[in-house]
Image (tube, helix red, strand yellow):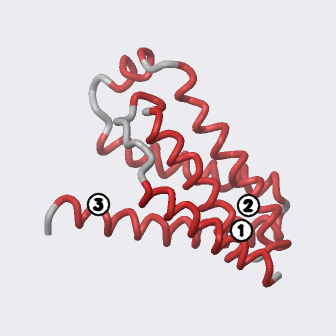
């Protein structure tokens, strides 16, 4: 299997995991509260991350952390906000609409990030194919919104 096919398969699997994670987190939020469940799932994630670091931590990790631009740590803040929002909206919108909205937002930002090479990513200019893909995603989202 080529690296590209493996990357596609792993990306698809990650998308599946995101859907499972969202429903587990939202269900936990209904049991213990939205803010509390966000804390618990991030605590569990921290523990799992620490266990993985015990086995796979590079020797120069601390110096690498120290040299990273500080804004890059904003991903942790966004992770908390995403879990809080998902926990709050899944019971109101359902999984399909919630994830449809999440994915549409992700695609919109991805097109912008690729087009301008944000965060030092390679530049992938908006093409007609990409534009039609985004339009199709919006059309699908509108269809989902009209159903509910």
Is residue 115 positioned above or below 95 on the image? Answer: above
Q: CA distance from mark 1 to mark 2?
A: 7 Å
Q: Quadrant of the N terminus?
A: bottom left
- Nearer to us: label 1 or label 2: 1
Rendered image: mark on residue 111 = none
Which residue corresponds to mark 2? 86
Residue 2: quadrant of the picture: bottom left
Which residue corresponds to mark 3? 7
Residue 143: quadrant of the picture: bottom right
What residue sits 37% from the left and 36% below the top? 123
Q: CA distance from mark 3 to mark 1?
A: 25 Å
Evaluate if marks 1 and 2 touch, with contact meaning CB atoms under 8 Å apart.
Answer: yes
> On the picture, is 124 further left or further right than 76?
left
Among the two numbered marks 2 and 3 on one chain, the one whose residue lies closer to the N terminus: 3
Q: Position of residue 103 (x, y in %)?
A: 59, 62
Among the two numbered marks 1 and 2 on one chain, the one whose residue lies closer to the N terminus: 2
Q: CA distance from mark 2 to mark 3?
A: 26 Å
Which residue corresponds to mark 1? 98
Q: Quadrant of the C terminus?
A: bottom right
> On the picture, is 76 further left or further right than 143?
left
């Amino acid at each position: 299997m080529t690296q590209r096919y493996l990357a596609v398969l792993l990306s698809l699997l990650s998308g599946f995991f995101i859907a499972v994670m969202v429903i587990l987190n939202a269900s936990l939020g209904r049991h213990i509260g939205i803010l509390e469940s966000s804390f618990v799932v991030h605590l569990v994630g921290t523990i799992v991350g620490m266990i993985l670091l015990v086995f796979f931590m590079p020797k120069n990790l601390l110096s690498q952390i120290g040299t990273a631009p500080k804004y890059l740590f904003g991903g942790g803040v966004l992770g908390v906000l995403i879990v809080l929002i998902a926990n709050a909206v899944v019971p109101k919108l359902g999984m399909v609409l919630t994830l449809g909205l999440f994915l549409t937002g992700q695609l919109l930002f991805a097109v912008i990030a690729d087009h301008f090479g944000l965060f030092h990513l390679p530049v992938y200019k908006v093409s007609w194919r990409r534009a039609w893909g985004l339009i199709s995603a919006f059309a699908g989202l509108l269809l989902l919104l009209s159903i509910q």
